[in-house]
Amino acid sequence: MNLESPKTIVNKSPQEVFNFLSDVKNFEKLMPENISKFEVLDEDKFLFALKGMPEIILKKKEATSPNKIVLGAAGGKIDFSLVGNITEIDSDKSEVQLVFNGDFNPMMAMMIKGPITKFIETLSTNIPSSI
């Protein structure tokens, strides 16, 4: 399953956006209002939970400055990734898009598609006001 957030314009350079997304504790600022738990586990890993959903641990797996951040599932039964693609528009303006990739059975995919789509849209929407 591959889900993409809308592209978001950020009035910051790609490097500034990359630096912000590289620091996992900043993801707390991007979370939706229905977050019930957020905890930084180490410099590259955090745990979060949304109301009514299980806890999810994300770990920074790859960072290609200033254009790409890859977070992946750290433990658990489901393997997925959340990729932040950062594109330069000009020296102080960037475009950010989040892409969720996961390998799920059709029943699971049907159940989580809506909540995951809304989740990555919220993260993406919150980036410009959080940096």
Image (cartoon, helix red, strand yellow):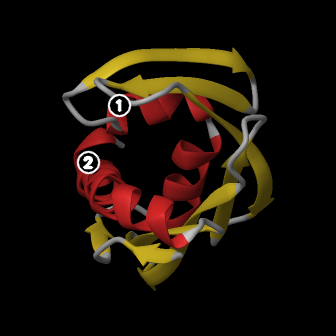
Q: Secondary structure at mark 1?
A: helix
Label placed on residue 29: 1
How busy is the neighbourhood of tag 1: few (under 14 within 10 Å), some, or many (20 plus)? some
User: Where is 66 relative to 127, above or below?
Assistant: below
- Check whether the beta carbons of the residues at disc 1 and disc 2 lie within 8 A of each other: yes
Inspect the image, locate mark 1, and give the three-letter code of the amino acid beneath it: Lys
Where is residue 11? Give x, y as percent: 29, 63
Where is residue 94? Give x, y as percent: 40, 73
Q: Secondary structure at mark 2?
A: helix
- Between residue 56 and residue 106, name the one nearer to us: 106
User: Where is 101 relative to 116, above or below?
Assistant: below
Q: Residue at x 80, y 58 (%)?
A: 62
Q: Residue at x 29, y 70 (%)?
A: 8
Cα distance, mark 1 to mark 2? 8 Å
* Residue at mark 2: 126
Left or right: residue 118 versus residue 47 is left
- Between residue 72 and residue 93, name the one nearer to us: 72
